[in-house]
Image (tube, rainbow, N blue to C red):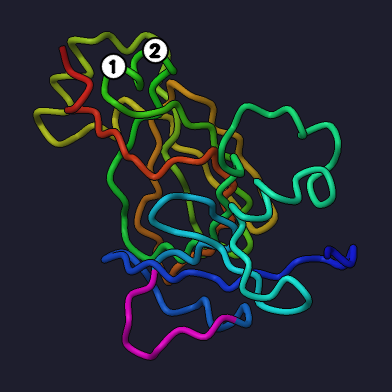
Amino acid sequence: MYSGNPLIFEPLPVKRVWGGGKLNAYGKVIPYGTSVGELWEVVDRREAQSVVRYGLLKGETLNALWQGHREEIFGAHLVNSPSPRFPILCKLLDVRECLSVQVHPPERVAKALNGESKTEVWYFLETASGAKVYAGLKKGTSKRSFELLLAMGHIEEALHKLPVETGNSLFIRVSHRRSYPRQTPGPSENDELAELLELTFFPSALKS
């Protein structure tokens, strides 16, 4: 039975080559010398499941709660949700290196590539001086100019460069290109809420 108290899940560490070492500062236990770039705090996927850490529901998976206690835990308004899984993935990111540019295609294109569309919200818990992100195509960027910049390795010239500071948030809807650039000096932390998807599309995969 659900007591009504907040549920705390075991975080799932994910190694990334761009991961830093600052997640310990947020109460997370990261082994020294490992490049953990992401902690999945809330996830309901076939290959990754959040598990309740404490209380009467200790050991229960998020999917089991979604399937068996939906109204009790998530609310009556979600009882008839068609989603077989809890549709939000919450991550804590430690980004120290420049990430690749990724694309969030609309649902029609994503399905054609055997994927799903993806909308994200970022909240920046901590940023280095001069931190920035690339997000969205600049106005007037043509398909031809985009492909040329992609071929030359200068795709960032087609993207908006946005300065970010601690406490900023950013909403990234589908059909956007985005990337976290290298932070100098030091890493930044980013809390990310995303639709249930961990399939990444790169610009070259969407070329016709």
Q: Over which residues does the magenta segment extend?
A: 28-36
Above/below status of 12 relative to 115? below
Q: Position of residue 202 (x, y in %)?
A: 25, 34
Question: Residue 70 is drawn in which quadrant?
Answer: top right
What quarter of the picture does the N terminus occupy?
Answer: bottom right
Question: Residue 32 is drawn in which quadrant?
Answer: bottom left
* Residue with the mark numbered 2: 108
Asked whether 104 falls inside the magenta stretch, the response is no
At a point 49% along the width and 55% down the height, the residue shown is 131
Q: Position of residue 86 (x, y in %)?
A: 61, 44
At a point 38% along the width and 22% down the height, the residue shown is 105
Three-letter code for the amino acid on which mark 1 is drawn: Ala
Asked whether 33 falls inside the magenta stretch, the response is yes
Q: Position of residue 39 (x, y in %)?
A: 49, 66
Q: Position of residue 8 (x, y in %)?
A: 71, 70
Q: How many residues crowd around disc 2 within 10 Å: few (fewer than 14), some, or many (20 or more)?
A: few
* Residue with the mark numbered 1: 112
Element type at mark 2? helix
Mark 1–mark 2 CB contact (< 8 Å): yes
Above/below status of 53 relative to 91? below
Which mark is drawn over residue 150? none
Three-letter code for the amino acid on which mark 2 is drawn: Arg
Q: Is residue 196 left or right of residue 180?
A: right
At a point 31% along the width and 65% down the height, the residue shown is 16
Question: Is residue 102 or residue 67 the one in the foreground?
Answer: 67
Q: Main secondary structure of the magenta part?
A: loop
